[in-house]
Amino acid sequence: MKFEIVDKFLSYQSQLENPELHFSGCNLSGQKLIKVCQKLVSQKNIHTLIFKMRTNNLTHSDLAQLGNRLPNIAHLMNLSIFLSRNCVNDGLIQFAQGLALCKNLTTLMIELEQGNVDDSHMSYLGEGLGKSKSIQHLTVQLKENQIKSEGLTSFAKEVSKIQTLETLNLDFNQNKIGSTSLKKFETSFQESQLLSKLNICFQINNIGQEQIQSLIKGFNSCKNLTCLNLGLWFNHIDNECLEIMGKELTNNKSIKKFYLDIKVQNKVDYDQIGLFKLAKYLAKVKRLYHLELVTQDPFSVELSKQYLSQKHFLQLKKIPRLVTLKYF
């Protein structure tokens, strides 16, 4: 979308409520960005804003400008902002602090894929967003960055301070989580008050035996967690990991829905023994009524009937809950 066309459109429209602006690859930066922000602020009825700025020449100063001006959109409630493939990392704290000042903002989605985001940037982003008094639903997409365990931990601890937060969606696909200890993650969500839904994708990371216990303990620290959607495709999940995961989840007193995607793993594998052990422990989680496991199929056709009749899976099915098994 050409800048001149949008600029003219915003100049003549005064009653916009849900604008969707596409500036991806348009060299939107500096004075052009400031001008667009000024026009948006002049609109009095905007409730929902979709702002796509992928692959531009945005700098950390541009991101700071966004943070300064977005709070002036008085009635903004829903914001989706796409910033992938820009060099904006050092401006994340000013940007996030500005978003925290949006008094009516309840739903926020930030896309920061392929941006060389590392642990320090995650700390800045979490610190800024953690000051919000209104965000209820937060989504951050961070595919293909340089985030390690420390970045995950610091971000989680900071956003858990948002007292209004109910849903947290995080995509860490293709990062470096698990390459260092996750011990500090074990208390990440203990300050959360209303957070009940966690959807986290760790696809293509380094999570294995040394990390899985701390990871589940961290989720258990969220005292009101009812729904956990966990993606662990292409990590290092083996039979022992599945047993550890099951054991730790028996300590969870609130979870009702659990979705686990473990599909294909990297260099290690699990089999029916690991799945049976996981099922044995999940059967002891009293509040759990919806369980969905997405796995590879490690069983031959001849073993399928035997697999489905194993006592631990039958035990799961006797409990009044929905159990879904999917094979990849």
Image (cartoon, rainbow, N blue to C red):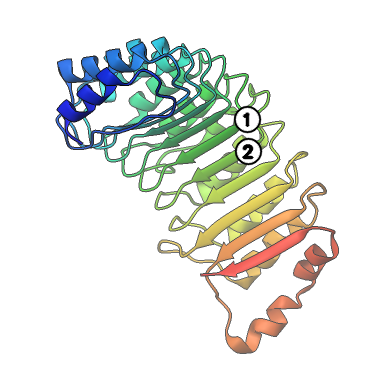
Q: Nearer the viewer, residue 142 or 65?
A: 65
Q: Secondary structure at mark 1?
A: loop
Q: Residues within 10 Å of mark 1 (few under 14, many from 20)?
A: many
Q: Residue at 39%, 47% (x, y): give it.
A: 173
Snapshot quadrant of residue 68: top left
Quadrant in which the N terminus is drawn: top left
Q: Amino acid at mark 2?
A: Lys
Q: Nearer the viewer, residue 62 or 160?
A: 62
Q: Residue furthest front?
A: 12
Q: Residue at 40%, 49% (x, y): give it.
A: 205
Q: Residues within 10 Å of mark 2 (few under 14, many from 20)?
A: many
User: Is the Cβ of the residue at disc 1 closer than 8 Å to that at disc 2?
Assistant: yes
Q: Secondary structure at mark 2?
A: strand
Q: Earlier in the sequence, mark 1 or mark 2?
A: 1
Q: Amino acid at mark 1?
A: Glu
Tally of marks: 2
* Residue 210 as seen in the image, left or right of residue 123: right
Q: Residue at 31%, 44% (x, y): give it.
A: 144
The location of residue 232, given as percent across then percent down, is 50, 53
Snapshot quadrant of residue 276: bottom right
Q: Nearer the viewer, residue 285 or 40?
A: 40
* Residue 310 as seen in the image, left or right of residue 41: right
The location of residue 304, given as percent across then percent down, is 65, 82
- The numbered dot on residue 197 is 2
The location of residue 148, given as percent across then percent down, is 39, 37
* Residue 284 as seen in the image, left or right of residue 328: right
- The numbered dot on residue 166 is 1
* Residue 99 as seen in the image, left or right of residue 106: left
Q: Residue at 47%, 19% (x, y): give it.
A: 76
Determine the CA span between mark 1 and mark 2.
Answer: 6 Å
Q: Nearer the viewer, residue 236 or 68?
A: 68
Q: Is residue 230 above or below residue 254?
A: below
